[in-house]
Amino acid sequence: MENNFSKKFLVSANEANPEGELAVHILVSDLIVVATKAALELGIGNPTMAHLNAGWVLSRLTIEMTSYPKVNTEYLIITWVESWNRHFSVRDFEIQDCEGNTVGYARSIWMVLNTITHENFGLSHLTLPEDAVSKRPCPISRQEKHIEIYRHDAEEVPSSALKANAGERSYTFKYNDIDFYRHVNTVRYVSLLLNSYSLEEFDRFFLSRLELSFLHEGNFGETVEIRRFNHPDYLSSFSLFSEKKNMPILFARIALKARQED
């Protein structure tokens, strides 16, 4: 059997960013769509687990892009299973533009969530078809360990942590941030992070790498403090710190690269 799955998408005007290319949050949404359809093809999709009150959720996501598909063009996402164990599944992606050029890759780590207890359900109840795991390579580097980020005015910070150097801002999750599992949708997190940048910054730079590490669920009405540390060379680390839980619920890294002049 084929051990990869592919699907084409059209970059419509409402799915393009102001620079006329596929918006990052739409790309993330399309990756999730393709992963969902691929799981259905393998017979391990969410409908097979409905009676168990369980379903797939992202644990980590890494995207690395050299360029983005342009508005009003089609692009292709190819996906395959890299590895599988009783706790997690690793699924990779290749992104191609309308001319068949590879413009990026993504690596994702998935777990099965118990939708009642919101704990890790495990994968032992699923049977992956024979030869479903692919030897196809995913050439992007894996995520490094997430780093705790303290407020800019913290008096004591462990040597292994960072102190925010770009201030903080707060956000309270609203109805449209919440998905079927009644927690914050991945796409909403991405939009929230990208809104930390200005239009001018994205006119000059593009997102070359995005890392998301989901630590705890975000919920409706929950307020998070967005802490940001700017590294050299247009790399930033983010922590979404929950005031209610008194802990970070998401860690992210975003790397930018300068756009080439026409």
Image: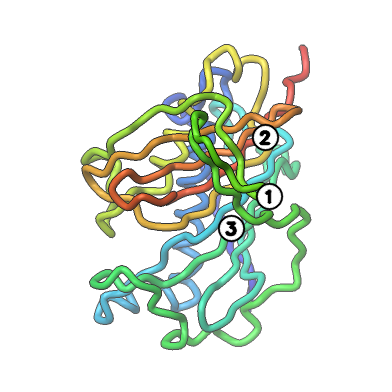
Question: Disc 1 designates what residue?
Answer: 105
Evaluate if marks 1 and 3 touch, with contact meaning CB atoms under 8 Å apart.
no
Q: Mark 2 or mark 1, which has the lower sequence index?
A: 1
Tell which tag, 2 or 1, sits nearer the viewer. 2
Rendered residue at 75%/72% (across/down): 135
In the image, residue 224 above or below residue 247: above
Rendered residue at 54%/27% (across/down): 72
Q: Mark 2 or mark 3, which has the lower sequence index?
A: 3
Q: Residue furthest front?
A: 155
| Relative horizontal placement of residue 134, taking residue 155 as reference (left or right) | right
Q: CA distance from mark 1 to mark 3?
A: 13 Å
Element at label 3: strand
Residue 186 place in picture, x, y as percent? 42, 48
In the image, residue 71 above or below residue 34: above
Q: Nearer the viewer, residue 260 or 124?
A: 124
Question: Disc 2 designates what residue?
Answer: 255
Of the residues shown, which amino acid type is indicated by label 2? Answer: Ala
Q: Nearer the viewer, residue 236 or 31?
A: 236
Of the residues shown, which amino acid type is indicated by label 1? Answer: Tyr
Question: Disc 3 designates what residue?
Answer: 6
Q: Quadrant of the C terminus?
A: top right
Rendered residue at 64%/74% (across/down): 83
